[in-house]
Amino acid sequence: MAAGVSNYDELLTSEGLPRHAALSECLSALSGEVLAERQRHAEEELLEKGITFAVYGHNDGHEKIWPFDVVPRPIPWDEWIMIEAGLRQRIRALNLFLDDVYGPGRILREGVVPASLVKTAKTYRRECEGFRPPGGVWTHVVGTDLVRHSDGTIYVLEDNLRCPSGVSYVLENREIMKRVLPEVFSGSTIASIEDYPERLLGALLKTAPAGCDRPTAVVLTPGMYNSAYFEHSFLAQQMGIELVTGPDLYVDGHDTVWMKTTQGPRRVDVIYRRIDDDFLDPEVFRPDSMLGVPGLMRAYRAGRVTLANAPGTGVADDKAVYQYVPAIIRYYLGEEAILKNVPTYLCSEPDQCRYVLENLDKLVVKPTNESGGYGILMGPTASVEERQRCAEQVRRDPRNYIAQPMLTLSTVPTVINGRLAPRHVDLRPFILYGDDVFVLPGGLTRVALREGSMIVNSSQGGGSKDTWVLLSETPFTRLQEQTAGGVSG
Amino acid sequence: MLCRVADSLFWMSRYLERAENQARFIDVTSDIALGYRGSEDVLWSSLLHAGGDVEYFQERYSRPTRGNVIDYLLFNRDNLNSVLSCLTAARENARSVRENLTTPMWEAVNRFYLRVRQAAGQSQQIITQPHPFLDQIKRSAHQVLGVTEATWSQGEAWQFSRLGYQLERADKTSRILDVKYFLLKPGAAGAGSELDVVQWASLLESTGALQMYRRVFGRIQPVNVVDFLVLNPDFPRSLRFCTRRVLESLRAISGNTSLEPVNRAERLAGEVLQELEATRAGDLLERGLHEFVDRYQTHLNEIGGAVSETFFRLTAFSGT
């Protein structure tokens, strides 16, 4: 698993030749010492700017900076076009799916996706049945996780349709990059990302309830001890709208949402909520929630306020429903999926479950409804006890688990102790859906800083990189690594 | 703007102002201590009196030595008014309303906090030689004020922030005046029969007023010192100046262009200002400076309470 023979590196071919000549040339002109110094400089900036995240269970002032690596991760333009088309297709299909599942339920009746699977998902919200959000837009903001396997193919690892975070790091990483390593920009033309807040605001305002002349949008945060608080505050600031907490809002007897201001109540039309469904409204979901707003779902169902993303979207990023996404795309759009899924075994299917239990040492087992890398078993590296514990959990609640072959994530050179060493990365592009689908070029590249590790989550020792969609350079020639074959363990 | 945000901006500014005053008081006291003839403990404990901290201090330290008092005022985490506590609170407030601040403002506050936190890690070194650090605190505080003036729109958010630091400033000037005057007034136990010019000058210096005082009055006279710190209309730390700014901010927040107050905070601030404008220093001393300051501080607290009730309390909406 360590940088093996078949590793795909995003900068170098298997023969050790640069895939992106201009970029590699700029990098090789910098000594290890200079790189390490720029690296320190970048981290000081992050600290001074207070670009931090909170780690739960960590006492030391709660906040950590998220390590940033100065070597960018390039994406060639022609490859990006394919990724972008694939993501657009996926988002359109998943929104049609949500509309259908909470509406007429055709796809379930026709058996394309088993109704039992959908209705048993923890994230399926009965409260949303029969409701259609403005414009049929359920997922205003999506962050889809992509990885490139050693076969050179890019796979969708998971669709994050609820409250995906990380876009603030995409924007801040670019700013830091321009300041600490301006020289590597020379010779490359990079797609700009700076208009994201403007586009996000556009998507929010366009999905305001019908009849709103000049809608007011806000960002709803659980508060400053949430791990993504920096991002909530950053996005509100960049869009120039209020950042509110649950207690700043209330719903009146006419199902209207108001915020409490020094000049009296002010009406709220669109809420970009960064609170999970469970905590949104204590009258409907968890009654002990202190973070939400009592009556919010009432206002939402009355069409008096837009929630972005809509409640209930989690059912479409359930890891078991994931397996059906290619079928979902075919069903609604009559197209084949452009982006590949990772082969997935559903433990809810007895045959597949048996295979999973017999091959735990070769598979990655994931709970269907967790995020942040929690609860995952990496079969090949797990201990015997860990595998046994996992097997028990799978037997007890098969619906809650899926398994996938272990992928070997591609690598990008990364500054480690003053020199460049390959480290595994993934990619999370961000997709906005207002009246049209917009894919932010690039996305968040997360990097596992430990040698050989494939765990890129910020809560578990990952860092991040700037992601460059290269608009102009010597045209990228698709390499032979790209084969049609499936995934080998 | 959101009630919660207004509340946080108000307190962010108050805590920053409090930290700066704390640094200035320590700085001046350190200066006087050099070559001081009386008891150093008395000198240092006057700072505890100014902050109303005596009892709290006694529970935690044996004697009000220089080292103990400086440690308490700069780095004690239990002391909610220590510089470290102030910066932690100011920064928490700033962080909770970061989207309302300009980026340079937030960065200035965050840097200020990081410097103080770093200094707390080497407190013994700093207590031995506090001047460079105290200078840094003052400079950092001025940097926040400067970048605020240079980058922030002077709308409602700015008014709440200004309201916070003007109330705090008025409070601190009045406290230090009260305590020092008690120690220095002719006939007081610790004071010599002769006018202690050095000490009086230090009182002015601890509010940053000495240079400006000289330009107005020249030589040092207790009645003129009181006049300057309480009644001067132009000096930015005099009670009258601060009170006028408080009233201006209150009126701007409610958009009041009439002569009549529209809420309790405005009415209180208006009354206090009127009194300050009609008073002469001589009369003030005759009636008793301490009584005057006591009453003034009660008024400030009432204004603070009225602001909170009128603008910050969320209960106003609970009936809906």
Image (tube, coloured by chain):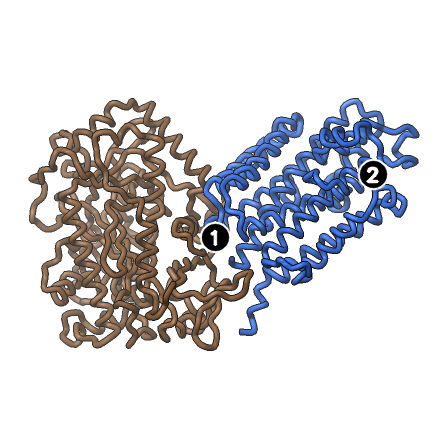
Chain colours: A brown, B blue
Q: Secondary structure at mark 1?
A: loop
Q: Secondary structure at mark 2?
A: helix
The disc labelled 1 sits on which kind of residue?
Answer: Met
Measured in 3D between alpha carbons, the distance from the residue under mark 2 to the one under mark 1, in whole angstroms, is: 44 Å
Seen from the viewer's position, the closer of residues A82 and B53 is A82
The disc labelled 2 sits on which kind of residue?
Answer: Tyr
Residue A131: x %, y % from top left? 30, 74
Seen from the viewer's position, the closer of residues A407 and A384 is A407
Residue A19: x %, y % from top left? 15, 33
Q: Is residue B315 above or below residue A176?
A: below
On the picture, is B166 further left or further right than B48?
Answer: left
On the picture, is B52 further left or further right than A436?
Answer: right
Number of other residues with Cα within 10 Å of mark 2, as a class: few under 14, some 14 to 19, many 20 or more = many
Counting every numbered tag in the picture gives 2
Q: Is residue A479 above or below residue A299?
A: above
Residue B45: x %, y % from top left? 78, 37
On the picture, is A103 further left or further right than A39?
Answer: left
The residue to which callout 1 is attached is A224
Label ID, residue B24: none
The residue to which callout 2 is attached is B181
Mark 2 or mark 1, whichever is nearer to me: 2
What residue is rendered at 53% in x and 55% in y? B5
Residue B167: x %, y % from top left? 67, 48
On the picture, is A230 further left or further right than A177?
Answer: right
Number of other residues with Cα within 10 Å of mark 1, as a class: few under 14, some 14 to 19, many 20 or more = some
- The answer to whether mark 2 and mark 1 are in CB contact below 8 A is no
- In which image quadrant can residue A137 be found? bottom left
Residue A359 appearing in the image: yes
What residue is rendered at 30% in x and 57% in y? A141
Seen from the viewer's position, the closer of residues B61 and A382 is B61
- In which image quadrant can residue B190 be found? top right
